[in-house]
Image (cartoon, helix red, strand yellow):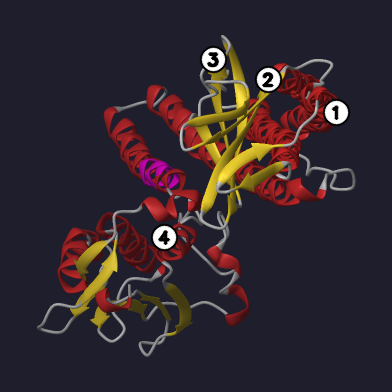
Amino acid sequence: MLQPPGPSAPTLWRDLLRRLLLPLLLIVAATGALGLYVAQTLTERTFDQWLIDAARSLAQQVRFVDGQARVDLDSDAEAILAFDAVDNTYFSVRQDQRHVAGHRDIPARGLRLTHYGDVQVFDTSFAGRPVRVAAVLVRSGGASAQVLVAETQYKRRGARADLQLMLLPLGVLLLAAAAAIVLALRWTLRPLELIAARWNTLSHRSLQNIDMRDVPRELLPFANALNGLLARIHELLLRERHFAANAAHQIRTPLAGLQLGLSRAAEAPDLASARQVIAELQQSTQRTARLLQQLLALGRLDPETANDLDHQSVDLVALAHDVGTLYLDTALTRQIALELVVPEAPVWAVAQGELIGEALSNLVDNALRYCPPGSRVEISVSADPPTLVVADSGPGLAADEREAVLERFVRGRSAAGDGSGLGLAIVREIADLHGAELRLQDSALGGLAVQLRLRAPQAL
């Protein structure tokens, strides 16, 4: 049963929002900060340049007479220099700490010092107000004088405030971009949700393949993988249905025989007749048990679990000896010579020992079941590659039937006895799970030889 995702489960929606909105926020914030810094820097330089121009103009009015600095500045020129509709402008000319002209006590040093060639500009305070000062050094011969022009910073502060208003449209732009991203994601993911809902409905109903015509290109690999999964599930279900139908048919016959035998035993006129019926029932029960054992073996052989098998190094010589020992009594009862032809040294193969033992048991059981009394059955093991062979001197199998008898519940045309047609099918599926090679061919003994080639340990 499918479990709903938990509250902390990752979602494509949240991931996309985080990966798109966070970089957008950082980009807009960095752009705003950089733009504001550049604009303020340019504005400060512009105001500083105006202040420097005023200081240079004043410096041109400085004259030196006998080494003494003098300023030829009438009242009109001084008024023009000091005029400003917003800020107050002050100036001072001094020589060797001697006041020559203008306002006294304008500081000659300050903070945020900036050099523009031979001019220094800095922040300080004068007359209780913060001012920006431009300092120019005037030289003539061996004499020099310092010209200071100070200006209050009302225009600068106003310009900074105006520049900070640039952040408002950036914020609006960020909100608009975020809204566009959210809407774009919703419009993009909504069709995907509709496609997923349709896939979920259709696949649950019929396991049909997904229609690829309206699938976005980016989802084609996912859709192809899902179609492959649906095809495998559909194939497994068909196999299980076919297996269940055949199993029910095969079990129905022996069960009916058991019921009939029990009725005959109950109606037997004497003890000897009852014992004869019971002996027949015992044989039928053994055949039914063998059939059920084979059906259970087939049920365990799932191709989807081939990668989960516990492959180990298996000694085929020991395995053949153990299986042959199990069938000695059966061979003696049926008057069949059971022989084991193996090398003295172990023959190692990479396999799941229990399954290979089951395959060999089915091959030996088939040979003993279909060979008449007086026949010969040989179990042999060879190396390079590691191979198991079960050969007999029985009636054999026509070449055109050898592929068909590997299917479930299929027997040869001339097959006698009470077989179910499952033995070779089990062997083939075990061989497929191991990537082994299964061959049916004529035996040197005159009947059929079944050869199972496995992989050596170094070949894994």
Q: Residue at x 59, y 16 (%)?
A: 130
Relative vertical location of residue 401 with respect to residue 177 in this rendering, above or below:
below
Residue at 58% x, 18% y: name it.
4
Q: Secondary structure at mark 3?
A: loop
> Are the residues at dot 2 and dot 3 in contact (C-beta closer than 8 Å)?
no
Q: Which residue is mark 1?
A: 187
Mark 2 to mark 4: distance in Å? 93 Å
Distance between mark 2 and mark 3 Cα atoms: 56 Å
Density class for disc 1 (Cα within 10 Å; few <14, some 14-19, many ≥20) is few
Quarter-of-image position of residue 88? top right
Confirm whether the magenta stretch covers residue 343.
Answer: no
User: Vertically, is 366 above or below 179?
Assistant: below
- Residue type at the position of mark 3: Pro
For residue 243, say whether it is visible. no
Which of disc 3 and disc 4 is earlier in sequence?
3
According to the picture, the residue beneath numbered tag 3 turns out to be 7
- Residue 184 visible: yes
Q: Which residues are magenta?
A: 289-296
Q: Pick whichever of labels 2 and 4 is earlier in the sequence.
A: 2
Disc number placed over residue 430 in the picture, else none: 4
Question: Gap between marks 2 and 1, in whole Å?
Answer: 52 Å
Is 263 or 148 nearer to us in this picture? 148
Q: Looking at this view, is 451 or 460 the one in front?
A: 460
Task: Tell which residue pokes out farthest to the left in this image.
Answer: 344
Of the numbered discs 2 and 1, the one sitting upstream in the chain is 2
How far apart in space, not on screen, are marks 4 and 1 (Cα)?
52 Å
Q: Earlier in the sequence, mark 4 or mark 1?
A: 1
Question: Whole-percent x and y of residue 386?
Answer: 28, 79
Question: Closer to us: mark 2 or mark 3?
Answer: 2
Question: What percent of the width, then of the height, locates residue 272?
Answer: 28, 34
Q: Earlier in the sequence, mark 3 or mark 1?
A: 3
Residue 153: image tag: 2
